Image: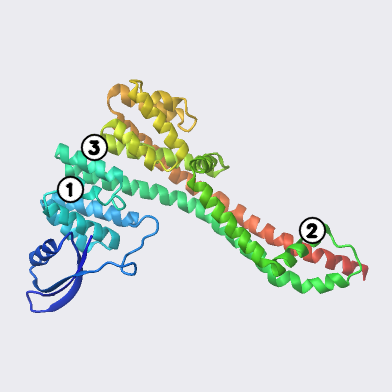
Amino acid sequence: MPQFEYQVRTGTGKQIKGKLTAQDKSIAMEELRKRGLTVFSLIERKSSILSKDIYIGNPVKMIHFIIYCRQFATLIRAGVTLVDATRILAEQTESKPLMKALQGVYSSLLKGIAFSQAVQEHSKIFPALFVSMIRAGEESGDLEGTLERLAIFFEKQHNTREKVKSALMYPLTVGLLAIAAVVYLLWAIVPQFVTMFESMDAELPAITKLVLSLSKSIQGQWYFWVLGVIALLLSYQLYKRTDKGAYALDYLKLKMPVFGKLNQKSSIAQFARTFSSLYASSVPVLQSLAIVEDVAGNKVVGNTIRKAADSLRQGKPLSDPLKRAWVFPPLVTQMIAIGEETGSLDQMLAKVADFYEMDVENTVDRLKSLLEPLLIVFLAGVVGIIVAAIMLPMFSLYGNL
């Protein structure tokens, strides 16, 4: 979308310069005049590689998107028009990518384009779940309620993800500290004892020989170690991008000791919360399942959801294929079956989501209390092995003296 540089004067006579994104110059001029500004100059910026914004990963932080949904719902509830609410939120959001997207949405709304269609044009900013629920809200006339449900959904999803991240980050941090400590000892400390060990007319313990060999390798051939680590990381990323690799890694996440159950509970909570929100917003079930499959966060769970959608197309209950999948515990499938029979599927899914979100939170708290002493012992043990490898020959030498 074109970007324009402008020079304007405010109602108080102050001259200011700035930038504005709009679909064309006339819309940019209309936007500035609506703000009560007198336009002196409005020039379109020529796009170039250097002037383009480059974003890696998700361009909008979840917290910024949550704030946007909350504020949007509040403005609509207060009677502010959809166009004005979009303009206001574009001006005050702290996220630059979201600001540019909202400016584009605002320009589309001025042309009479529906809000759901306008946000769909910015698929990198607004996820499919958001677009589908907004479209359903427009059709039902309950856009305000839809925005409230979206805000609640993204808040709960964000909280669950942050809990899982916090549980995973602690052992990862300790592991990196252990690696850093080992590399430092092998690089800087162990070599100081090499000359002394060589002068000793005695057979060194196997552990000492191993540590000395590693130290010599890291000092003399460090570039091979660096290249090896880089090659390993690149191989992991390439494997992860393949369908087979992504499925295998996600399967491993669900089966790994301790953290497997946590990842499974997190995926179930995300599935239930997403499906419940879409169903409550009157999004068609098959369309909801297609969206849930994409946002499940795990290929194993996603494949199970796809089988459930295929079963539903054949006129079979949704709960049948889920009962045969080991990923979904009996509690989940029974609640879904009850929801199908009673016509309260969204309520049953919401209860499942509440239960597993609370379970994830409690599991994370327990893991932190259990892992902290274990990881400290692990770190001490790793460093202790290297220290013991150095000290054992010295004790032997002192004993001979």
The residue sitting at 86% across, 62% down in the picture is 204
Q: Nearer the viewer, mark 1 or mark 2?
A: 1
| Spatial separation of the CA atoms under disc 1 and disc 3 | 16 Å
| Spatial separation of the CA atoms under disc 2 and disc 3 | 64 Å
First in residue order: circle 1 vs circle 3: 1
Q: What element carries label 1?
A: helix
Q: Judge from the rendering whether residue 146 lies leftward or rightward of residue 363; answer left or right.
A: left
Name the image quarter holding the C terminus.
bottom right
Asked if residue 12 shows in the view, the reply is yes
Q: Name the residue under label 1.
A: 115
First in residue order: circle 1 vs circle 2: 1
Q: What residue type is labelled 3?
A: Ser
Mark 1 neighbour density, 10 Å: few (under 14) some (14–19) many (20 or more)? some
First in residue order: circle 2 vs circle 3: 2
The residue sitting at 48% across, 47% down in the picture is 241
Which mark identifies residue 65? none
Q: What element carries label 2?
A: helix
Q: Name the residue under label 3.
A: 281
The residue sitting at 45% across, 27% down in the picture is 330
Q: Mark 2 points at which residue?
A: 207
Q: Which amino acid does label 2 sit on?
A: Ile
